[in-house]
Image: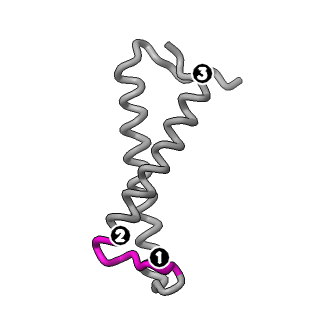
Amino acid sequence: MEATPFDILMILSLGVLAGTGTGLIIGFLAGIRKRQWASMPAGDRQKTILLILACSSVFIALLSWYLFQYSEGATFPALF
């Protein structure tokens, strides 16, 4: 099975969606994330953005591993 561009876009979109939600919830529970973005200091904004990026990359990696683990011989499509 070959990974189609739709599979790759699905992994990216679901990973970013789940990572953003998880990062915001973790930041809010840890006291880093406030209800209003404008009321946060610059350092807390940076921590929140890094937390979102880290969670998104973890979810993308897990979803790609899942796709390629359970599909026999899956490869990325040739772009050129």
Q: Say if 20 sits above or below 65 in the image.
A: below
Observer-side mark, 2 or 3, equals 2
- Give amino acid for label 2: Gly
Position of 71 compared to 79: left or right? Answer: left
Q: Determine which of the numbered discs, if any, sits on residue 35 in the image.
A: none
Residue 47 horizontal/vertical position (percent) = 41, 72
Q: Quadrant of residue 61?
A: top left
Residue under the point 40% across and 13% down: 72
User: Which residue of the protein is positioned furthest toward the right in this rendering?
Assistant: 80
Residue 27 horizontal/vertical position (percent) = 35, 69
Residue marked by disc 2 = 27
Residue marked by disc 1 = 45
Badge 1 or badge 3: first in the primary sequence: 1
Inspect the magenta stretch and tell me whether residue 32 lies in it: yes
Q: Specify the principal SS of the magenta part.
A: loop
C-alpha distance separating marks 2 and 1: 10 Å
Of residues 57 and 38, which is closer to you in this image? Answer: 38
Q: Say if 68 sits above or below 9 in the image.
A: above
Badge 2 or badge 3: first in the primary sequence: 2
Of residues 78 and 34, which is closer to you in this image? Answer: 34
